[in-house]
Image (cartoon, helix red, strand yellow):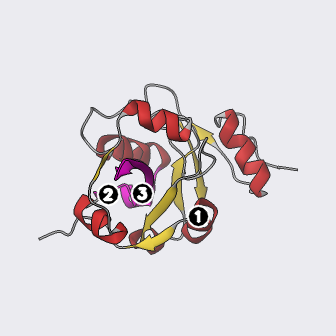
Amino acid sequence: MSTHDTADAHPRFAEALRELGLDVPVRRFPDATLPRSPKGTGGAPIAARAAAAIGCDVGEIVKSLIFQADGVPLLVLMDGGSRVDVERVRQELGAESVERAGAELVREATGYAIGGVPPFGHRTRTRVLADRGLLDHDIVWAAAGTPHSVFPLDPKTLVAHAGGTLVDVRERTA
């Protein structure tokens, strides 16, 4: 039985927490705190706003990003301060093509809207790549199924429950 209130999590995600035996606090922010990021920005503005609201570094935010690899949905977990290098993802998978998924495919594959996709508890099972940079932090914060709710977890546990494979797929800085 959970000692933390998961009422602010999306119901599907709250159920996933129960099934996994995870006892984590879920925090909800007022709707105005974390507005959705503009299309095509890769989640950077929402990650920065989430970090400010939580009081953590933007690198401690986990972005759960859905891509299509040869037409098959793929989840990439990336820290909030970095961007996914699509070519590195393509090479990692040995795929012909990799591209960002549209809002409809994100909701279809995960059951959640863009901006609120958690790292696990999805409608369908997808392959998960987790950027190794997430392990640079003691605690990371991820969406709890809505754009306005988050939960903390140590990154190794988060990646394990997501069924993620650790990879290096962040864009390299010059």
Q: CA distance from mark 1 to mark 3?
A: 11 Å
Of 134 and 138, the residue lying toward us: 134
Alpha carbon separation for disc pair 3 and 2? 14 Å
Is the C-beta separation of discs 1 and 2 under 8 Å? Answer: no
Q: Which mark is residue 76?
A: 3
Per the rendering, the mark at residue 163 is 1
Q: Amino acid at mark 3?
A: Val
Residue 150: give x, y in percent of width and height: 56, 44
Q: Nearer the viewer, residue 164 or 105?
A: 105
Is there any visible trace of residue 34 in the rendered image? no
Verify CB contact (< 8 Å) between mark 3 and mark 2: no
Q: Residues within 10 Å of mark 3 (few under 14, many from 20)?
A: many
Name the spot of residue 18 as percent of width and height, x first: 78, 49
Mark seen at residue 133: none
The quadrant the C terminus occupies is bottom left
The answer to if 37 sits in the magenta stretch is: no
Boundaries of the magenta span: 55-83
Residue type at mark 2? Gly
Instruction: Tally the marks.
Output: 3
Measure how far apart labels 1 and 2 are at the Cα level.
Answer: 22 Å
Residue drawn at x 61%, y 41% is: 123
Q: With respect to residue 151, does 88 lie above or below?
A: below
- Residue drawn at 54 percent across, 64 percent down: 139
Task: Of the two numbered discs 3 and 2 on the same chain, state the one appearing first in sequence.
Answer: 3
Would you say 161 lies left or right of 33 here?
right
Secondary structure found at label 1: loop
Secondary structure under the numbered disc 3 in the rendered image: strand
User: Circle 1: is it few (<14), some (14-19), or many (20+) Cα within 10 Å?
Assistant: some
Tell me if label 1 and label 3 are in contact, CB under 8 Å.
Answer: no
On the image, numbered disc 2 is attached to which residue? 81
